[in-house]
Amino acid sequence: MQNLQKSLMQQALGDAWEQLPPALQAHYRAGGNTESGHLDIDYPRFMQPLLTLLRWMGALIDRSGTSVQTLVQRNMAGERQLWRRSMSYADGQVRHFNSFWLYAGGNRLLEFINPVLGLEMAVRVDEQGRLHYEGQRFVLKLGRWLLTIPEWLALGHTTIVERALSENRYDMDFRLTHPIFGQVFRYSGEFEVEPRSSSK
């Protein structure tokens, strides 16, 4: 039976959801799916100690690589959308990056890397059907309160662009740019969407 519940991205985009091409709608449709692809992961050497610390906190990836095989699993748990990412390197090492999303009202989404640290992002669709994310603020969740952490005190400004390549493939480009240190982290790559039934 088809799941008629709107996904978090449908809620955030509103009518603009219909402007997304099929591959991106499949990427974000209600229920769950599995996606496989590869990522190029790059960052300046001076970021290594900080990324190692952030990985311990549940954020990002602390190893660079080219065409790293990546598996992304997404499903819902109540109002949360769970993301599980596994990066498998050629030497057998595996890195995991998990997070959960919440709808934050309007065109905004919150992604938490752990129960207290998160990023609020605004989403929009451009004239070519590409999906854009713009970081709005980093947040610290203390009970019912969300405290703002300025971008310059954290990793910088977040941007993500996703573009459909075919009916079930898309590419993405994630960047963190600090106002002083420049681009401090990037991963980009291509994925194939493999929808699965939400009842599974």
Image (cartoon, helix red, strand yellow):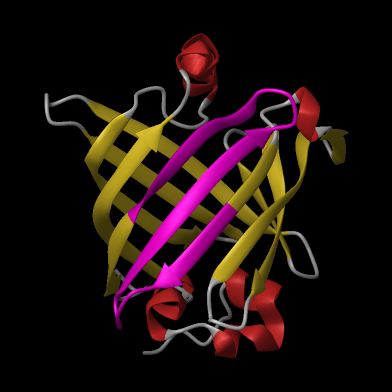
Nearer to me, 28 or 91: 91
Q: Main secondary structure of the magenta part?
A: strand
User: Could you tell me if residue 142 is visible in this image?
Assistant: no
The answer to whether residue 99 is left or right of residue 84 is right
Residue 194 falls inside the magenta stretch: no
Nearer to me, 86 or 114: 86
User: Could you tell me if residue 8 is visible in this image?
Assistant: yes
Disc tally is 0
3 shown above or below 150: below
105 shown above or below 139: below
The answer to whether residue 141 is left or right of residue 162 is right
Q: Determine the residue positioned at 31% across, 59% down.
A: 190
For residue 200, what is the image quadrant? bottom left
Residue 70 rendering spot, x and y as whole percentages: 26, 46
Nearer to me, 52 or 160: 160
177 shown above or below 30: above
For residue 64, what is the image quadrant? top left
Residue 84 rendering spot, x and y as whole percentages: 39, 46
Residue 174 falls inside the magenta stretch: yes
Residue 175 rendering spot, x and y as whole percentages: 55, 43
Nearer to me, 199 or 81: 81
Could you tell me which quadrant the N terminus lies in? bottom left
Q: Bounds of the magenta span?
A: 160-189
